[in-house]
Each structure stands twice: as structure tokens, then as C-alpha cells.
Image: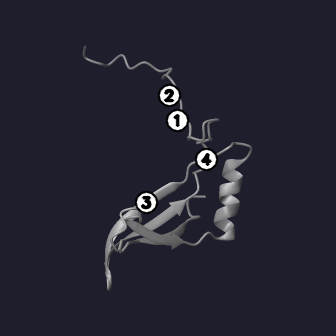
Amino acid sequence: MSDIKTTGALFITDKQGNANRPDYNGDFKLTQEFLAALTAALGDAPDCKVKLAGWKKQGAKGPYLSLSVQPPFQGSGREQSSGGEPSRPTARPSTTLDDDIPF
């Protein structure tokens, strides 16, 4: 599911003297595939987190942030916990002993 993502960009806002305007604004597209993956990740939970990444870029009109948004990872070996965070794999103690350790 990590291949399902959507992209967008944030551009510096011309505040025109209005301190309440955001510093950056922009948009990104939400595809049906992305929304389906997000809905599946949400399940019956009241919310879930998405993976958001940004890169500083220079465009013809000045600097901006290029964005990538991915739904939560759900794959074999990493199940979602009830809190929406991926659970960490549990360490299993080794059943073999190495008696050749010099101490």
C-alpha cells in the first residue's frame, strides 16, 4: 500500500499586510485509490494518521514546498494498533546459546 500516494505543493502566500493569512497555501489531489486506502486504514476508528513529506523546491515564481501524502502503511508483519499507530514487531528471545563467547 506504500505505493498509493498523492502529491501537491505549498506556495508562499502574499499576505498583503494581513497577518492572519497563512504563510503558505496550495492543494493536492485526492484520488479514488488514495481515498479507498485511507477509508480501509480508518476502519471503525475515529481517526488515523497519514504520512506527509515535503521538499523545498525553487520554481519560476519563487520557492515552494512539494508535498507527498500517503495513507498509513498496512502490510503483513505490521498491523495497526488500536491507537492508529503501527505496532512494533515483538522481539523474540533466542532459544540457542553460543557457548563460544570468550567471557
Estimate the spatial distance between the alpha carbons at disc 4 and disc 2, rounded to whole Å: 26 Å
Precedes in sequence: disc 3 or disc 1: 3
Q: Are marks 4 and 1 in contact (CB under 8 Å)?
A: no
Residue at the far top: name it. 103
Q: Please tell me whether mark 4 sits on a helix, a strand or a loop.
A: loop
Q: Quadrant of residue 87?
A: top right
Give the image location of residue 76, x and y in percent: 62, 46
Estimate the spatial distance between the alpha carbons at disc 4 and disc 3, rounded to whole Å: 16 Å
Q: Are marks 1 and 2 in contact (CB under 8 Å)?
A: no
Q: Is residue 22 left or right of residue 34?
A: left
Residue at the disc numbered 2: 91
Question: Residue 88: which numbered mark, if any?
Answer: 1
Seen from the viewer's position, the closer of residues 81 and 30 is 30
Residue type pointed to by label 4 = Cys
Precedes in sequence: disc 4 or disc 1: 4
Q: Residue at x 40, y 62 (%)?
A: 20
Q: Please tell me whether mark 1 sits on a helix, a strand or a loop.
A: loop
Q: Is residue 48 left or right of residue 92?
A: right
Seen from the viewer's position, the closer of residues 9 and 6 is 9
Question: Residue 48: which numbered mark, if any?
Answer: 4
Q: Residue at x 49, y 22 (%)?
A: 93
Give the image location of residue 103, x and y in percent: 25, 13
Give the image location of residue 31, x and y in percent: 64, 71
Estimate the spatial distance between the alpha carbons at disc 1 and disc 2, rounded to whole Å: 9 Å
Estimate the spatial distance between the alpha carbons at disc 3 and disc 1, rounded to whole Å: 22 Å
Residue type pointed to by label 1 = Arg
Residue type pointed to by label 2 = Ala
